[in-house]
Image (tube, rainbow, N blue to C red):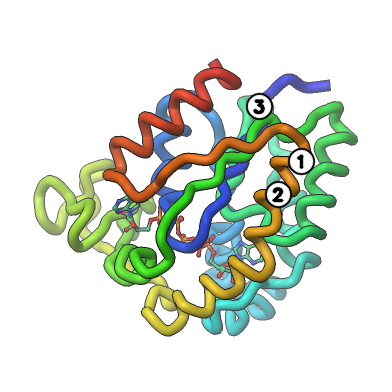
Amino acid sequence: MSNAPVLILLGPPGAGKGTQARMLEEDFGLVQLSTGDMLRAAVAAGTEAGRRAKSVMEAGQLVSDEIVLAILKDRMTQPDMARGIILDGFPRTDGQAAALDALLAANGQKVTAAVSLEVDDEAMVGRVSGRFTCGSCGEGYHDEFKQPAQAGTCDKCGGTAFKRRADDNAETVRERLKAYHAQTAPLIAYYEGKGVLARIDAMGPIAEVRQALSSIVGQVAA
Ligand code: AP5
């Protein structure tokens, strides 16, 4: 039995799940689990799962539950999970939500809170298209909304190489938004039914969203 908090960030591409999850790691010592990052690592490493996921991700569709669950289950056996986790980009389907419940129940746990980051779809195309990340530490930036303090140098690690994702173009973002509304948005009602859902307006500046999220997470992970 573990009392470690299990937090879920729900929201479409560009809602700020990754940005806020990294901040929650800093603020509360929780561990960010991003299935998107795990899948991109599998693609970069050329594993069997990565080879199968690559074209699906580039088309803006969801990777199969089978692949995603295998990657996540593996990560969830690591000892740092005892600090509590923030799930960023998972679950994304009914099947994933049920599998997460079963995985947690086996350890005497359940979802502590699911926070829906509420945003306007059209604005997400601009947010995602302007995103870039540090090639060394993965810190996220934006051409307009979050530039490094010193142009060309990462605020976090001093790295000078940056990269952009293959699926961060307007056309693919629209496909990802469709997939979100068809397969993932129904989970908002699922967690509402379990009494663990919170909604926050995520259209404001990053610092404002951080504050709203921190007050929710502070109640369950202090
Ligand atoms: P994933 O990597 O999870 O991407 P996503 O869900 O599409 O989300 P994003 O990373 O695009 O957005 P985000 O909400 O994290 O926004 P961010 O904080 O970066 O998944 C990629 C693909 O992998 C999927 O399409 C699918 O194929 C596959 N996949 C992953 N998980 C899966 C699963 N469970 N099942 C099946 N397939 C799966 O912010 C975006 C930009 O906006 C940044 O530049 C940031 O600086 C800026 N920004 C953030 N907040 C604000 C703000 N408040 N104001 C202004 N700018 C902001």
Q: If you read the primary sequence from the N terminus, does the residue marked by circle 3 or circle 1 appear first? A: 3
Q: Nearer the viewer, residue 160 or 202?
A: 202
User: Is residue 79 visible to us here?
Assistant: no
Task: Return the residue at label 3.
Answer: 5
Kind of residue sitting beneath label 3:
Pro
Q: Residue 118, relative to residue 216: is it above or below?
A: below
User: Is residue 185 visible to us here?
Assistant: yes
Q: Secondary structure at mark 3?
A: loop
Q: Position of residue 199 (x, y in %)?
A: 53, 40
Q: Quadrant of residue 80?
A: top right
Residue drawn where x is 47% and y is 40% of the image? 200
Kind of residue sitting beneath label 2:
Ala
Q: Nearer the viewer, residue 161 or 206?
A: 206
Q: Residue 12, relative to residue 60: is it above or below?
A: above
Q: Position of residue 191 (x, y in %)?
A: 71, 43
* Identity of the residue furthest to the left in this view: 150
State how far apart marks 2 and 1 are (Cα).
Answer: 6 Å
Task: Return the residue at label 1.
Answer: 193
Kind of residue sitting beneath label 1:
Gly
3 vs 1, front mark: 1
Disc on res. 110? none
213 sits to left or right of 186: left
**Do callouts 2 and 1 mark residues in contact (Cβ within 8 Å)?**
yes
Local packing at callout 1 (Cα closer than 10 Å; few below 14, some 14-19, many 20+) is few
Q: Position of residue 77 (x, y in %)?
A: 75, 40
Task: Return the residue at label 2.
Answer: 189
32 sits to left or right of 188: left
